[in-house]
Image (spheres, grey):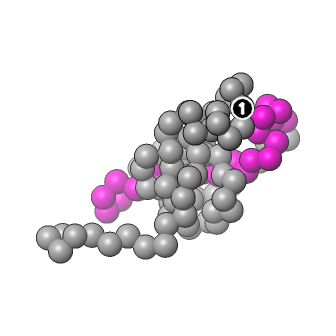
Amino acid sequence: MYLARIEGTLTATIRHPTLVACRFLLARRIEGDWLAAEPVVVLDRLGARHGSTVIVSTDGDVVRRLLGDTVPARLSVVGLVDRVTLGAGR
């Protein structure tokens, strides 16, 4: 799992049948004080918005349990982050 920021949406007119109920979002992994250069496509069923900080699961089992064994994806939004608090030493 990792934190990411939602940068946009992706529209696909033709989808695998298991992905009909999902939104595709473009997310950039948060690496300390910067964002990864390359965005990734993540599945969203929680309603994340542009600019949201989210928790992304890289475990394909989560997606398969929700959408079936034939789903052709593994990255999914599993949480919407309200705030991040760093320890006192940071």
What percent of the width, then of the height, locates residue 83? 43, 73
Q: Residue drawn 58% across and 51% down?
A: 77
Residue 14 quadrant: top right
Task: Say whether residue 28 is visible.
Answer: no
Q: What residue sits right under mark 1 in the picture? A: 68
Q: Residue drawn 80% across and 47% down?
A: 21
What percent of the width, then of the height, locates residue 8? 64, 57
What percent of the width, then of the height, locates residue 10? 71, 49
The correct choice, above or below, for 37 with respect to 14 in the image is below
Does residue 30 appear to the left or right of 89 in the view shown? right
Q: Residue drawn 43% across and 46% down?
A: 1
The correct choice, above or below, for 14 with respect to 50 in the image is above
Image quadrant containing the C terminus: bottom left
Residue type at mark 1: give it: Gly
Q: Magenta stretch containing residue 70, yes or no?
A: no
Magenta residues (range): 14-35
